[in-house]
Image (tube, rainbow, N blue to C red):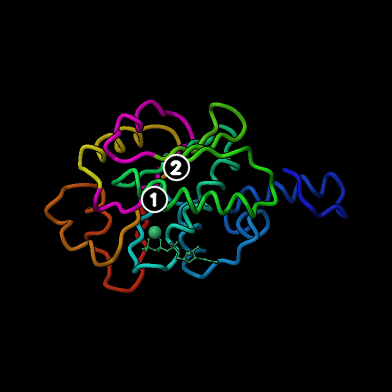
């Protein structure tokens, strides 16, 4: 990855690039030029480290902003990295996460290739991010053994059939999942068996909490 720091030798640049690619927080700062809020740092570090991250929070605290960063970081970090992003409706996919991804790309110091409405390829056909609504569960199939990040925005609205497909994908490879929910919408969860329950069932009542497993 190129950096704008031309005072470094080639070896130092390579070391710096490796460090940035290994750290989503540094990636956000150095490549996307954003200053992160404390909770956003916590979410990104969890996505890097843990297979499952669940975030419940109030409106407007930066959930979608943070997963837009996570999407671009995962693509850059893993040459065969795949990011599957999903929300209950097509409209949410387009107008929330993917419009934030488009804004991030405009400010990126690294020249990402041209982005489509809800699809971005980085190095080749095996290194891509795609957004789809959750009535397209078949999109979760066929990624065994790869580096996959699954992002479920507005997760409580997602059908249980979709969670079965997600569980299948998680059976092999390096698959991380991040589930986001509005704090107030978690009450009805207990009647719907899903990975969301397992993670959020014991969540605290604090404004923002992350459960990691
Ligand atoms: N670190 C940051 N720097 C600058 N702007 C930010 C930052 N974090 C979030 N924002 C901006 O704050 C606003 C709210 O963030 P975001 O939409 O990610 O919140 P949210 O938690 O997903 O909200 P909702 O629950 O309504 O979906 C957005 O306009 C986003 O671009
Ligand atoms: Mg949001």
In the picture, the disc for residue 208 is: none
Q: Mark 1 and mark 2: span between their CA atoms?
A: 8 Å
Residue 63's image quarter? bottom left
Q: Name the residue under label 2.
A: 149
- In the picture provided, is 120 more to the left or to the right than 51? right
Point out residue 201 in the picture as x, y percentages from the top left corner.
22, 59
Q: Looking at the picture, how far across and down is residue 15, in whole percent?
A: 75, 48
Residue position marked by numbered label 1 in the rendering = 178
* In the rendered image, the vertical position of residue 80 relative to residue 13, given as above or below: above
Q: Position of residue 8 (x, y in %)?
A: 85, 52
Residue located 55% across and 32% down the image = 127
Please tell me whether residue 98 belongs to the stretch shown in magenta: no
Locate the N terminus by quadrant.
top right
Extreme left residue here? 191
Q: Vertical placement of 182 versus 191: above or below?
A: below
Identity of the residue drawn at 56% across and 39% down: 115
Evaluate if marks 1 and 2 touch, with contact meaning CB atoms under 8 Å apart. Answer: yes
Instruction: Indicate yes or no: mark 1 CB to ligand 1 under 8 Å.
Output: no
Which portion, as a residue range, is magenta?
132-157
Helix, strand or loop for disc 2: strand
Ligand 2 visible in quadrant: bottom left
Q: For residue 149: magenta?
A: yes
Depth check: give the residue in front, 123 or 133: 133
Q: Is residue 179 left or right of residue 123?
A: left
- How crowded pointer 2 is (Cα within 10 Å; few <14, some 14-19, many 20+) is rated as many
């Amino acid at each position: 990855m190129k950096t704008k720091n031309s005072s470094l030798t080639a070896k130092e640049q390579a070391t710096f690039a490796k460090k940035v690619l290994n750290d989503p927080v540094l990636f956000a700062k150095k490549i996307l030029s954003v200053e992160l809020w404390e909770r956003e740092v916590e979410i990104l570090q969890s996505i890097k480290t843990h297979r499952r991250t669940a975030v419940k929070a109030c409106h407007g605290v930066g959930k979608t902003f943070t997963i837009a960063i996570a999407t671009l970081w995962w693509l850059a970090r893993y040459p065969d990295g795949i990011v599957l992003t999903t929300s209950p409706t097509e409209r949410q996919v387009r107008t929330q996460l993917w419009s934030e991804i488009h804004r991030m790309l405009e400010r990126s110091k690294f020249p990402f290739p041209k982005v489509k409405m809800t699809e971005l390829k980085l190095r080749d056909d095996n290194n891509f991010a795609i957004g789809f609504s959750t009535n397209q569960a078949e999109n979760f199939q066929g990624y065994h053994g790869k580096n996959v990040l699954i992002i479920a925005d507005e997760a409580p609205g997602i059908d249980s059939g979709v969670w079965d497909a997600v569980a299948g994908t998680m059976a092999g490879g390096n698959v991380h999942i991040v589930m986001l929910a509005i704090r107030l919408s978690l009450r009805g969860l207990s009647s719907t068996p899903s990975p969301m329950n397992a993670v959020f069932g014991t969540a605290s009542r604090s404004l923002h909490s992350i459960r990691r497993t």
